[in-house]
Amino acid sequence: MAPDSGSFPEGPLLRLLPLEAKDRGTQRCRLGPAALRALGARLGSAVKISLPVGGSCLCTVWPRRDRADGFVQLDLQCASPGAAGGASGTLGTLSLSRLRLVPCPLLRRLTVWPVLRDRTGTPDAASPADVLEAAQELLRNRPVSRGHVVSVPPGAPGPLAALHVVGGTPSPDPAGLVTPRTRVVLSRAPPSESEQRPEVPLGGLSEAADSLRELLSLPLRYPRTLAALGLDVPRGVLLAGPPGVGKTQLVRAVARETGAELLAVSAPTLQGARPGQTEENVRRVFQRAQELASCGPCLLFLDEVDALCPRRGGPYGAPENRVVAQVLTLLDGISGDREVVVVGATSRPDALDPALRRPGRFDREVVIGTPTLKQRKEILQVITSKMPTCSHVDLGLLAEMTVGYVGADLTALCREAAMHAMLHCNKNQDNPLIDETDFLEALKKIQPSSFRSAIGLMDIKPVYWEEIGGLEDVKLKLKQVFRQARANTPAIVFLDEIDSILGSRSASKKGCDVQERVLSVLLNELDGVGLKTIERRGNKLGQRSKCKDLKKNEELEFQEVFNQNVMIVAATNRPDVLDDALLRPGRLDKIIYIPPPDEKGRLSILKVCTKSIPVGPDVSLEKLAAETCFFSGADLRNLCKEAALLALQENGLEATTVKQEHFLKSLRTVKPSLSCKDFTSYESLFQKQEFSNLGDI
């Protein structure tokens, strides 16, 4: 059997032989049959080779003519800068583990930077048409890699000396094959400027990137196919999200991936001082985008577009209205140009003029909300990947502590932690490490910015059933309710302390006050829950009368729109002040009474509260549960905290356990928040006839 390269620590060594004259300029790598079997390579497979002198090269695999094993011959025509000039004869030996098969998809588009023979380094020394023709001929049917240099064989005619591979579609990383159908484009920037914009991982933005990539890939990658099919695709995309979530970074990354030229403009910079100057600046930007589109797909990115196109008819005057009208006209003008896509970004989508969001303009919207727990962890992993953090830093725990933080906040948090580590590093000033203490100190200074924004969903730390002691019957009923809710509705609205905004209309003596109006609105919403606001046309009774004239299947579909998608959950400790209309069937028709915990429930709660407290062996939670009648769950948690504080006050930093005496002392100061009178009033209230028919007591 052939030797497996994976079984060798360094792989079998292959001796480098001089290249044959017939193979010069062919970009071939000739190997023996054993090496070919070990690699699993076929004739013409693309292989990337890490060179011992540094750098790498890209070749196609071919067998040796003498079929001898233990030798290799390389043509370094396509190699990383500097490696192409090395003489293969001086390399000596090469380990087989340095050869790696890479996928090589067909390239639709390739961007290169030409180096001319007169060594001016610019394509202006020769005709651009001649340079492009020479580049197409040199690259035909060759595998290339992003960042590599394709050298022209010595003595070959033409103006080219070499070609730097800048990028392509799909990205030639690690490799891509140039075919006669590949569109070769000359880059406008030298490789040094292109390499200053490295690829940035999109931590936490993968879902939004997929949505934006799908919208942009169709018009940018398949314009001719769409034209042949006569399909209209979105020409404008609106990104909405809180400031700092990464909208600009997302657009730059997707533009680089799709191979489109990016023209990024901050909308406030287009504002002019004299009348008509803003409209002139806008026209110039759109004209520049169409010029770039003549050489390939172009993505025009308008950041903070709400500053350029505010809602008309408000406090804005005629100049702003003219600017909005100009932008709308220009958007309509590029609708037939399949090489231009306009992307706008805003943190205030409601401030945009509605005409800007109709189909044909910004008709697709991608909402980037506040990062969730998983997304925050991904963002922190990307940010800290290049930072010297301690191994015991728990990014998952840090993600839980940063609810409401967006990408910019997390970047500032890590930067502040690094500054704190640098200023307080005493032992190892040359190689400081960032530990948990530095992040905790940074949390005191960096506050979440999304709390000040009206866009984005806020997530909270999850609470599990095991963290709730006692109340087994209530938990069982709640599980059933929420299980039914998950099976029928994708959204739950929780109204805590509902009695603070809604009272009983019978208790009002002044007629229609604010609480009554709020109650009326809520009752109407509960009756029409699930019906989108934009779908309402007239009142509900009028719609139901129209519904009677529909067919049976249409009527069922109409009723589903009325009743699905939302479940309302409310909580109160004063059910006696709620209006009777709110508690009737069809609205809040499922009433669950949560009584004070009994002795068994109190014992369960005490076990939950003392999980993180080092209690002594003399502590009897059963006795504490028996002595804490009318204690609620919050009272019991407070009791445990007071006992821990007493232990800390007595023994200081040497305190290791909380004893029974500490709990008994705490019982003298911590009193239950419930009384026998409160318990009796709740029991009498929920034993009334109107509640007993629900079967929940």
Image (cartoon, rainbow, N blue to C red):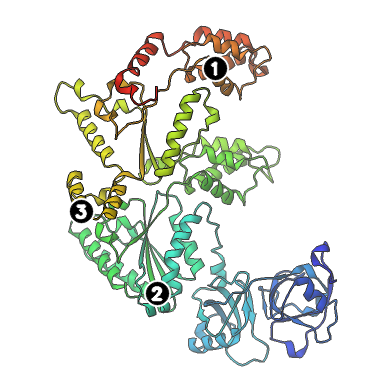
Q: Which residue is mark 2?
A: 339
Q: On screen, 495 above or below 307? A: above
Q: On screen, 599 above or below 362? A: above
Quarter of the image containing the N terminus?
bottom right
Q: Amino acid at mark 1?
A: Lys
Residue lying at 61% horizontally and 25% vertically, measured from the top left: 612
Of badges 1 and 2, the one in the foreground is 1
Q: Which residue is mark 1?
A: 600
As helix, strand or loop, the secondary structure at mark 1 comes to helix
Q: Earlier in the sequence, mark 1 or mark 2?
A: 2
Q: Earlier in the sequence, mark 1 or mark 3?
A: 3
Q: Which residue is mark 3?
A: 316
Q: Position of residue 365 (x, y in %)?
A: 36, 58
Is residue 516 visible in the rendered image? The answer is yes
Q: Position of residue 353 (x, y in %)?
A: 25, 57
Report, in whole angstroms, how far the alpha carbon at label 1 lies from the one at label 3.
Answer: 66 Å
Residue lying at 35% horizontally and 68% vertically, measured from the top left: 235
Numbered marks: total = 3
Q: Amino acid at mark 3?
A: Tyr
